[in-house]
Amino acid sequence: MAGAREGVGGVNYPYAALCGWRGIDAVQRHCASAFDRFETAAPHLFGAPQNGNAILLYKAWESVLGAFPAYAAQQIGDCVSFGHGHGNDLLQAIEIGLGQPLVYRETDTEFIYGASRQVAGIEDSQDGCYGAAAVKAMTTVGMVSRAMLGVAGTYSGARAKLWGTMGPPADLEAQAAPFKLGTAALVSSWDDLVIAITNGYPVTICCDQGFELTRDTDGFCAASGTWGHCMLIAGLRFDIPGACVLQSWGPDVPSGPTALGQPSWSFWAERATVEAILDEGDSWALARAPAFSRRELPAAWRYDVAA
């Protein structure tokens, strides 16, 4: 087991320009007011015993696709759309793995970026948005897949910039309308997070907590410095309590050893750090259905770290 991982500050982040979370303000609070807290949205899920296993939702991609997605790296400060777009992708894989008759389609992040800024009323040219605005857009405007864009389906920072300034094209908004996220709920505690992940609901995190960019021998990155960034939690472990955080800066970021079959574009973060992130008030459990329900996850998505 690794020792304490306390941030040491002063880290040179080469990805600072890609950190596009705007923080908590009146606009974010207005968007967030449309949603319940997780404990209110899903009280029936609390109270079940914790079995002590690691919960590895990211394994759903391997179950359905045979490999992790080969995501392109961010090109502008549209991290909020990456965290939520990748969250919707993982949610698709989870639902398919649980037996739903869906066809997996990679979510277009540029559309989420433009739609989220539109519902938040952001009209300036500075990059960035909020998690609350992203889930509001996903549940009210809808989403499109990259396949729906045809030859234009490959990620483009220039397209994200354009749609973030002008809004998505009206014809795409019409196509997006049938493909809405079922619901979202504010995750504000470790207990919320455990219940959400244990039942197969990925959780996006938007915060100003920074991290080192090199994993230790257990796959963890130390908390260090600050960045305004959105990422995605896709796993939990309880032997060294922490969460698996998925990045959007390309493969092998961070660098260093991995653990429990995590993607190369992820790292583990300690529980105390994760709790501080959730306390910032812009982290969201995502569901395809209109309500959260109890689900039994496949054994392949769990790992008995004591075995």
Image (cartoon, grey):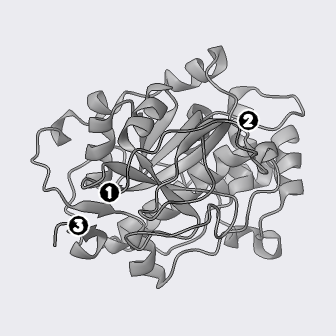
Q: Which mark is residue 200?
A: 1
Front in this rendered view, residue 54 or 74: 54
CA distance for labels 1 and 3: 19 Å
Near mark 2 (Cα within 10 A), the count class, few <14, some 14-19 or many ≥20, is: many
| Secondary structure of the residue carrying numbered label 2 | helix
CA distance for labels 1 and 2: 28 Å
Image point 36% across, 49% down: which residue? 242
Callout 3, which amino acid? Val
| Secondary structure of the residue carrying numbered label 1 | loop
Per the image, the residue denoted by label 3 is 305
Tell me, yes or no, if residue 136 can be seen here: no
Tell me, yes or no, if residue 149 can be seen here: yes
Is residue 199 toward the left or the right of residue 138 in the image?
left
Is residue 183 toward the left or the right of residue 14 in the image?
left
CA distance for labels 3 and 2: 41 Å
Near mark 1 (Cα within 10 A), the count class, few <14, some 14-19 or many ≥20, is: many
Looking at marks 3 and 2 on the same chain, the residue that comes earlier in the sequence is marked by 2
Which picture quadrant has residue 210? top right
Per the image, the residue denoted by label 2 is 117
Q: Is residue 6 above or below residue 235?
A: above
